Each structure stands twice: as C-alpha cells, then as structure tokens.
Image (spheres, grey):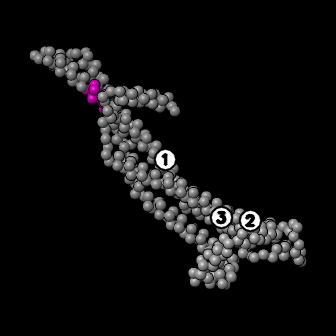
Amino acid sequence: MSWSGFKKAVNRAGAHVIMKTSKVKESSVDAEFDEKEKSFLVFERLMTELNAELGNFKDIFVDLIETQFKLVKALDSFYGDYNFDIEADNMVGINIESDGSAGDRVNPRDGISLTLLRNLNDIRLTVLTQLNEPLDITVFQPIKELNEYNDEIHKLIKKRGRKKFDFDVSKNKLEKLQNEYNSLELSLREENSTNSNALVNSNTQLEKYKEKLDKLKSEDKSITDIYTDINQRLKNEIDEYIALRFSLLDPSFESFMKIQLKLYTDLQEKFNNDVQIDGATREDHESGKLDSRLDEILSKMRALDIHNL
C-alpha cells in the first residue's frame, strides 16, 4: 500500500468511528445499484457453484474409470496376472502350451474380464486424455475466466463502497459546517438588525467559516464526481455483464453436452464391439428375462453354505 493509500485508510477508519458513534448516518441510497448488485451476487454464486461442480464431475468420472479398472484388474487376476507392458500374462508358476510368442502367453479364461480390462485401460490412457483438451478449452477455461471477472467486479464493488462512504462523510461534514455558518450568521444579524450586513461582512470568525466552507465544497465536488463516476460505470458494467451471460455460457454448455455425447458413444462402441456376451444372455436382456435369471442365481447363492462344501 502506498503512503497516500495508507493515509486514506487511516482517515477512513477514523471517519468510520465517528459515523458509528455519532447520530450521523450514511445517507446516500442508490436503489438501482442495490438491485443490480443483488442480481450480480446471485449470478456470481451460481458461477461459483458451476465451477465447483464441473471440477467434481471431472474428478468423479476419472475416479470412476480408475476404480472400475482396479476392480476388473482384481477380478481378472483370478484367471491370470496380465501385464500391459508385454501384452501377456506374467506366467509365474503357471505352465501352458505356447509357441513362445507373447500373444500366446495368456491363460485360457472366460475372455470377458480380459477384454473389459483392456478396454478400461484404453479408456484411461486414450479416451479420457483426448477429451481433456477440448473440455478444458471450451468449458473449464471459459468458466474459470468468468469467475476471475467476477472477482474483478467484486473489487470494483468494494472500491465503490469506499467511495460511497467518503461521499457520505463529505456530505455530512459539509452539512454540519453549513449549519454552523448559518447559525453564526443568523445570531450576528439578530444582535444588530440595523447594520447586520456590515457586521456579518466584517466578522473574522464568520470569514474563517466561509473559507472552510468554500474549501470543503471544492473537496466535496471532487469526491462527488469520483463516486458518481464509479457508481454509474459499475451499474452499466454489471448490466452488460449479466446481459452477456447466455452468450458466454451457451457455447460452453453446448460443448459440454457434445463432449459427453462423444465420451458415452465411444464407451458404448467399445463395450458393444469388444465385450462379447453369449447370445442367450443378450436375448434374455432384450426380452427382460435377465432379471429373473439373476434372481435365480442369487437364490442359489443364498442357499450355499460353506460348511456343506
């Protein structure tokens, strides 16, 4: 903080104490600005929530894929210890017939677990990575910039608040000094009604009041001009900013939907094309019989008793 800024802060702090402890109150009210500020604060809160939830969406989705990968890796480990670096099983302690090529070094297994494991690994390393850049450029970065702009408007609102306080203090000082001047002038005229003008013009105390009053009026004009300028500019800027919100948010929202569509389409294609499910299961799923089959399996599992095995 500069020295002049420090002095202003000290003077403003003293004025705050006077305003709080005296009967003088902040008098200026701009209902139009108050309404615009209220609208901005609502918009700012929504933008903050949107930014936070977008971050949560990305983190949760990445965590979901990572958790699925670890889960399937654990399930697939029952059939073999698949190593992505050599694209084959680590054949420790397991003997299978092989011609020596890495592709043959995969244990005989159901097949679905390994295919799913490979798919999820591909999703982790390629699909999600390919979406990061467009998601960042078209969604996360614009929302981040909007939030940064919100911070700038917040700074202006705080500055406007300081200028408004200076404006109120100046008006109160001016009013108080003007009342003192008027009171002294009135008392002088009442003391000598026959030659009141001459007495008023020659009174040194009144002359000092007049000098102070002229100086304070000049300072008040400067303070008023500064406050009026920032108040009007801020009202206009908030209006323009809020009016542009749809043109700023719509493209990001559209991009967000298209990116999700591509993501889920890619996932569906991978599972449809690579994960082969037997015809009976697929037919049961399409006809709605799969739930009954699952209930039957669950009933059998409930009936199992480890002591009878």
Residue 238 image position (x, y, % from top left): 40, 51
* Quadrant of the rendered image containing residue 264: bottom right
Q: Earlier in the sequence, mark 3 or mark 2?
A: 3
Q: Main secondary structure of the magenta part?
A: helix
Q: Which amino acid lies under the numbered mark 1 shown in the image of this protein?
A: Asp
CB-based contact (under 8 Å), mark 1 and mark 3: no
Left or right of 220, for residue 289 = right
Q: Is residue 11 above or below residue 113?
A: above
SS for dot 1? helix
Disc tally is 3
- What residue does disc 3 label? 65
Question: Can residue 269 be seen here?
Answer: no
Residue 203 image position (x, y, % from top left): 22, 15
* Quadrant of the rendered image containing residue 188: top left
Q: Which amino acid lies under the numbered mark 3 shown in the image of this protein?
A: Ile
Between 299 and 166, the residue placed more toward the observer is 299
Question: Where's the C terminus, which quadrant?
Answer: bottom right
Q: Earlier in the sequence, mark 1 or mark 3?
A: 3
CB-based contact (under 8 Å), mark 3 and mark 2: no
Question: Can residue 66 be seen here?
Answer: yes
Write the start and end of the magenta stretch as one range.
Answer: 171-178
SS for dot 3? helix
User: Residue drawn at (35%, 46%), measured in percent from left and top?
Assistant: 34
User: Residue drawn at (51%, 31%), measured in percent from left and top?
Assistant: 2
- What residue does disc 1 label? 151
